[in-house]
Image: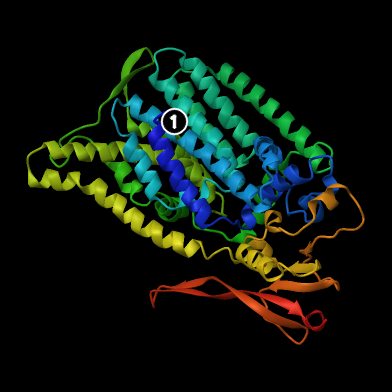
Amino acid sequence: MNAKLFLLLLVGVAVHVFISPYTKVEESFNLQAIHDHLIYTPKQLQRYDHILYPGVVPRTFVGSLLLSLPLSLLKVLNLDILHLQYAARLLIGGINVFTTQILFDEVAAAFQVKCDIWMTVLTLSQFHYPFWSSRTLPNCLALPLVNLSHLYYIKSSTKKNKQSKYAAVSLALITTAAVVFRIELVAMIAPMVFQLWFNRRLSLLKIALIGGGTGLAALSTTVLVDSYFWSTKLLWPELSAFLFNVYSNKSSEWGVSPWSSYFLVHLPKLLMTALPLSVVALLPKSKHLPNEMSQKFITVHAKVASFQPLSLLFPPINYIFLLSFLGHKEWRFIMYVVPLFNAVAGLGMGRLCDLWKLNTIKMKMMALIPFVAILINLSATILLTAISSNNYPGGHALSRFHQLVDRDAPSTVHLDVLTAMTGASRFGERYRNDECLAADTTTCTGWSYSKNEDYIPDEATWRISSTAGDDDWHVVDSVRGFKGVSVRDMKVDIGDVLYIQQREHAQTQ
């Protein structure tokens, strides 16, 4: 692995972590689970957030449990509880950056070109992948396994030895990711299996044995772990999610998009200039593009054939094609394809840069395209990062609240739905008395944090709410956040979205 490029990409991800440290509702389950593993341990399930506030469908605890193991070593440092959230995100980001970089290095080696720097810088210049790869989305927990699966998929095609072994590892990794973390990855398995079989890397029997054996092992793991944490017999969370979202079509309640949305909307948004640059790597030699890609020759059906960049995109393109038949679409469902597209785009950028050697003005101008593309990406990313940093008012409001009550006697604060959905996690509950909770005593000298959606407890003397104060509540401070974008006026609307309020009778005491 190229350590310098790894560190460069890691720094980029870390910058996003520190600019936008808080998380939103989609990430909350795994984030709260990591917190509960660290603070309460699995022996105190009654304290876990999912017991108090269960979601619509159960999610797996496997990823959060694995992440909490190395993070538990930091507890000896007596860090501020919010610092553990930073550490959790940096750990996830570091794992995803590592698997992404070794994938880039493998692609560069496969085509015998030094384009890994273009792949890394291109990824760094984008917004979505660096911004989200450190977050606790289930998709981000599945991402390292998908990256490694693609890595061994490439090895199975380009290496002269151990091709069947690499193919088997690739299939095992993607199967595990699908069974444990994201069931939609079955749509990625299908084209990969076809290509492994077509290229005679694995027979149908071996595919069945490896896929079935790995799937059974992964299934046993998730059922064993999640049945305990959810206190339910024989629970497979991803099956529950599939039945709820796909079979019962409940996901359509969150919106339905046209079939073409992934290709025409989400993919361009994720890749930015990497999308047209990836096409450059696929174009044949012509008078407008007189150079050609360095080719890697492989054996297919006992014949010598060239390993083309299009071979890298066969699984992701077909994955997106199959997923497009589902009505509800979100960009995070296809984020797994970004590294491979960026790798191919990096090959295209290297091809364009080589045109500088040709002594014509046209060729030299074309050689500057990669640099222009990076600048375009960076300009958009800086704007999107600035906007997105204002998208987590709940986390900022909770932090501001703690500053306001730093010298007050402990009481109860109520967090409304918007607050809880936009960054107010258990890691942010700085004044909660964890030792009291861990000892399972009936009284606690720390603050209590209520997230009940139906009512505000009578004992609550403070609240953070999207509704401004009334006769019973006095607004002490407000927190600004992202409210929308006016394309017509070219204006980003940032305004007060949450209000930190104290109950009137408590204020006079």
Q: Secondary structure at mark 1?
A: helix
* Residue 150 % position (x, y): 47, 31
Q: Residue at x 84, y 41 (%)?
A: 232
Residue type pointed to by label 1: Ile
Q: What residue is pinned by disc 1?
A: 102
Q: Quadrant of residue 71?
A: top right
Tell me which residue sits at (37%, 12%) in the image: 302
Q: How is the image coloured?
A: rainbow
In the rendered image, residue 393, in percent from the top left (x then y), is placed at 59, 66
Give the position of the C terminus as an image quadrant: bottom right
Q: Is residue 430 left or right of residue 350?
A: right
Q: Quadrant of the N terminus?
A: top left
Q: What crowding class fits label 1: few (fewer than 14 Cα within 10 Å), some (14-19), or many (20 or more)?
A: some
Q: Nearer the viewer, residue 114 or 399?
A: 399
Q: Is residue 241 visible?
A: yes
Nearer to me, 464 or 276:
464
Quadrant of res 155: top left
The reply to whether residue 338 is visible in this rendering is no
Q: Nearer the viewer, residue 327 or 100?
A: 100
Question: Seen from this angle, which residue lies furthest bottom?
Answer: 471
Q: Is residue 210 left or right of residue 302?
A: right
Q: Position of residue 492 (x, y in %)?
A: 44, 72
Badge count = 1
Residue 266, relative to residue 507: is it above or below?
above
Q: Is residue 410 above or below residue 281?
A: below
Q: Does 112 sit above or below residue 62? A: above
